[in-house]
Amino acid sequence: MTNASISKRIGTILLLVGPTTSLAISPFSNFDPINLVKLLFVTSLAFSVLGLFVSSVKQFIGRLPKSVWYASGVFILWSLVAMIFSDAPLNQQFWGVFGRNTGFLTYFSLIMMLVGSALVQEKAFYRKLVEALVLTAIPMTVYAAIQVAGRDPIQWSVMAPFATLGNVNFSSAFFGLASVCSVVLFLEKRINVYLRVLILFMVVIDFLIVLETGSIQGFMIFIAGVGIAGYLWLRTKLKKRTYQVVYLGAGVIGFFFASLALGNIGPLARFVFSETVLYRFDYWVAGWNMTIRNPILGVGLDSYGDWYRELRGEVATLRTTPDRITNTAHNIYLDISASGGFPLLVCYLTLLALAARSSWLVMRRTKEFDPYFTAMFSAWLAYLIQAAISINQIGVGIWGWLFTGGLIGYEIATRNEPEISRHKRAESRRPSSPMPAASALIGILTFTLGFVLAFIPFSADAKFKDALQSNSLESMKKSVNGLGSTAYQYELALDLALKQNNESEAVLLTEGLLARYPRDFMAWQVRALLPSVPTDQRLAAQRRLLELDPFNNTLNRP
């Protein structure tokens, strides 16, 4: 009973974390109004799950295969090893870079969510998890529609239908995932007909919003997800293998032509290919180069941007201008391998393989169409496809990690289903047992710990925003020297000193920036140009710039 009551609390937390993480924004308090508040929610709730798990670890440990524990544990352990032994700044690796925040704290929290989702093992929970994604799309759709209409009450730096995700590619991807689940649930006969019509209406609106974003990610996810769901429907409704083979053949051909289109080849190229696809190839090459150069430890968690200039190659440097840079590979698999080497990537792929194996076992023994499993599996696979061309944005990525654990848990929950159902009915007739006070206390304490850890950069960012609005160099200096600040904020303080022609402060800020972030390109540029810097140091800075960006034809050669 204790185990059941704690599982129920974990399930409640997991049903909250997806919607709150996707929807949370803080435009009135923070310089980064998107990522830090999402980090705050996902970390606080993930640490709650951790506390509840720890409070009853002996009962929970046997509920999952050892392979899940090993892959999850080694992922966390190797992240720590990479963070400690790589040369990247510790604070950057722990909290992540500005505008991304996919450092150790985020990945630790995502692993907790994956494990928690696998541990619940209640069919009703996984149904609610799918419904939670669809329900989250309702306020997201309303807000994006307001943005499309030009009625957004928040004065963002860019006006576009990015909803609460900060970028049209992310909102497009989210609407694609939600639409996959919505279309599949439309087939659920037990759902009220009026509700099904409402679901279909929302899918149409989301399609129009995705069109407005100009991003193909939503369409790509939707086509892939619905295509997978269609096959699962076909195999249960039409028993003839001929239909299944024809359907799969058409899917393989479509996938083949879509892959060719990424290289501007074939009939789909005019729909898929664009200049930004070429840029993504550049980012992927750089991520791969980081991985093979540092195959064991990587370059450090969320530190791709520190090495991009050096390892992007000559073609990428000169394709447009040398100042076209990025701090992510735009490919989650390469981001992970660049961050922590092949060991970290293998752990992640192992977790995905375990979810895929669980899904296969469910499909083998399922004779009837299961819309909730189909929705979760189809959206999950579509997310993995999207992950090959996009970023692990916390508000979108949370669903991918929840569904990864969810597929593992769903397979366990549906083993020997008749016997399990009888057990559940007997258990439901018993009076519900409250969660032990010790477990509740541990959960509260770990929630507080997670909140404090995530609040440090959140608070530092809020202080920086106040300092930036005051246009006070002294205030900005004070804010960027605090715990939780980022290299980008430091660069903005340095930029203000340069604009104010305050060379003495610019020198001090440059030295402080290089002490914290030795590979910061802007800091080396400033050191190479400031007249008050000794000649030998300026020449050394020019040489360092060439090391950091070897094919940059705009740099001076000393």
Image: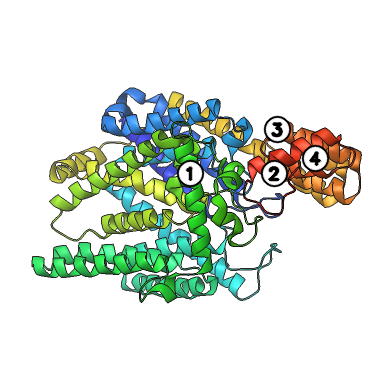
Residue nearer the viewer, 41 or 291: 291
Q: Disc 4 and disc 2: Cα gap in Å?
A: 10 Å
Amino acid type at mark 4? Arg
Establish if 332 lies above or below 301: below
Establish if 470 lies above or below 294: below
Displayed quadrant of residue 542:
top right
Q: Secondary structure at mark 2?
A: helix
Q: In the rendered structure, which disc, 4 or 1, sits on the residue that comes first in sequence?
A: 1
Q: Nearer the viewer, mark 3 or mark 2?
A: 2
Establish if 224 lies above or below 335: below
Q: Nearer the viewer, mark 3 or mark 1?
A: 1
Rate crowding at label 4 as few (under 14), some (14 to 19) or many (20 or more) other CA atoms within 10 Å: many
Question: What residue would you read off at disc 3?
Answer: 516
Amino acid type at mark 1? Asn
Q: Please tell me the numbered disc located at residue 521.
A: 2
Amino acid type at mark 3? Arg
- Taking the image as shown, residue 498 lies to the left or right of residue 335, namely right
Q: Nearer the viewer, mark 4 or mark 3?
A: 4
Question: What residue would you read off at disc 1?
Answer: 289
Q: In the rendered structure, which disc, 3 or 1, sits on the residue that comes first in sequence?
A: 1
Q: Secondary structure at mark 1?
A: helix
Q: In the rendered structure, which disc, 1 or 2, sits on the residue that comes first in sequence?
A: 1
Q: In the rendered structure, which disc, 3 or 2, sits on the residue that comes first in sequence?
A: 3
